[in-house]
Every structure is written in structure tokens, then in C-alpha cells.
Amino acid sequence: MLYSPRTSCGMLSLRTWFVLVLGITALVDANVIHTRDTCEYNGSKCPVYTVLSQGEGYEHREYEPASWIGTNETVREYTRNVSRMMYFRLRNYIEHRTLGMGVPVLTERGNPNINGSTTYTKYFYLEDQNSLEHGSENGVFRYYSARMRVFVRTYGGKPTYQQKEDELMKLKASIADSSLYNHEKAYFAGFNPPWVMNNRRNEVWIESIV
């Protein structure tokens, strides 16, 4: 299922190229600059990771510990308004504290509870990973992610919520073995502001348990 030796992301080509996977075009983005210790996308800092292996249409990555701010909502239906509300709650927090915002904007989706509601958590990656901001305020909290391994599918465009879920299903289909990942949550990562229409980068992550 997984192949290729453990490699650093710095070995990936810096040239944009397209490959046809499962009937869609998957994007390998020239705007991502990676070394073993740094990550940048279009000049913004992003979480540092190493590519452990590559599968057909996905990567198996290990992310270093990282610092984020987050906020969440538990809703029956995840709408554009809910997403915007969480986004601007985080945006106001960093602007009032002059904190630098990196990429991606990451949205964690849990599984529905017994009442049919689902908790969504939106995170901003902090450019200054050594910032001393702590605590929770106005629904925003500081979050430190531990070292984690994830399966990742990268795709372009400006996806709707349903299209994001479709990409998640394609990622699971590519992995094939459902015993390799956590079924309790999924992550959707966006790297571009809303006004950028072309050459957009999106990712879907699921936590690896291998």
C-alpha cells in the first residue's frame, strides 16, 4: 500500500506538475518550499513535516509539534455562515494582538453525537511559534498540536463543503485499508484567501495510526 523510503519534503520538485488520479487532477504546488526545518507557502509559514511515504494520490506525513489558535462550534449543519463566524473570531483575535497568521487555515470535523450535532474546530497556524499568548478569550483558545502522522490528499479549486467530503472519501479509497487511520475526525486545510481564484491549494487529512 505504502511505498518509497522515508524522505524529506525538501526532495520534492519545486516545479508545478499535474497527475491524473482517480479521474481528477491533483496538484503538486510549486509555491510550497520545504526543508527539514522550515515550511513556507507563498511567503507564509506553514507547519513543518516530513514525507514518510507516498501512495497513489496521497502522502503519509509526520508533522512536528506546532502552535495554533482555535475556536469551535457544535452544530447540526455546517454552513458558510458558521465557517465565516469562526474565521472572523480567530481573525479578530490575532489582529488585536498583532500575531502573525500562517497557513493553512485548518478545520477539524468530528463525528456526529447522539443528538445529530457535530463539533467543528477551526485553527490558525501562528507565524511566531514562540509567542507567549496563552489562555482562552471570547471563544478562542491556544492549542499545541503534538507530533502527529497523517494521510494527506492535495487538490485544487474552491471546494464546497460537499466537495471537501468527496475528497475525503477519495483519500480513504486510496488508502484502502481502514485499519490504518482514525475514523473519529477529519481535517480540511485551505492555503489561500477567498479572493484568490486560481492555483489554489487545498488538503484533506486523516490521522494515521501507523
Image: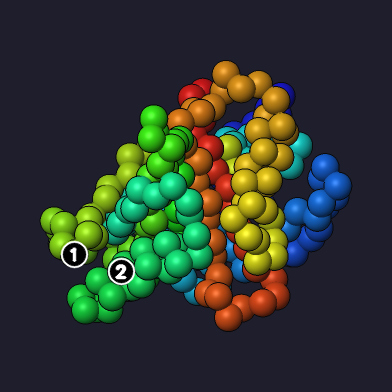
Name the kind of residue labelled 1 in the image.
Answer: Asn
Which of 180/9 is in front? Answer: 180
Seen at 28% across and 75% down, the residue is 92
The part of the image, by quadrant, that contains residue 54 is top right
**Mark 1 and mark 2 residues within 8 Å of each other at the beta carbon:** yes
Mark 1: give few (<14), some (14-19) or many (20+) Cα within 10 Å.
few
Residue 161 image position (x, y, % from top left): 59, 55
Mark 2: give few (<14), some (14-19) or many (20+) Cα within 10 Å.
some
* For marks 1 and 2 on the same chain, the one whose residue lies earlier in the sequence: 2
Is the image coloured rainbow, by chain, by secondary structure, or in one colour? rainbow
Residue 20 image position (x, y, % from top left): 85, 50
Which residue ends up furthest to the front in the rendered image?
115
- Does 48 appear above or below 63? below
Q: Is residue 65 visible?
A: no
Residue 120 image position (x, y, % from top left): 40, 49
- Does 14 appear above or below 184? below
Q: Is residue 129 left or right of residue 60?
A: left
Q: Is residue 101 left or right of residue 153?
A: left
Name the kind of residue labelled 2 in the image.
Answer: Arg
Q: Which residue is mark 2?
A: 89
Which of 46/14 is in front? Answer: 46
Q: Is residue 158 visible?
A: yes
Q: Is residue 143 left or right of residue 38?
A: left
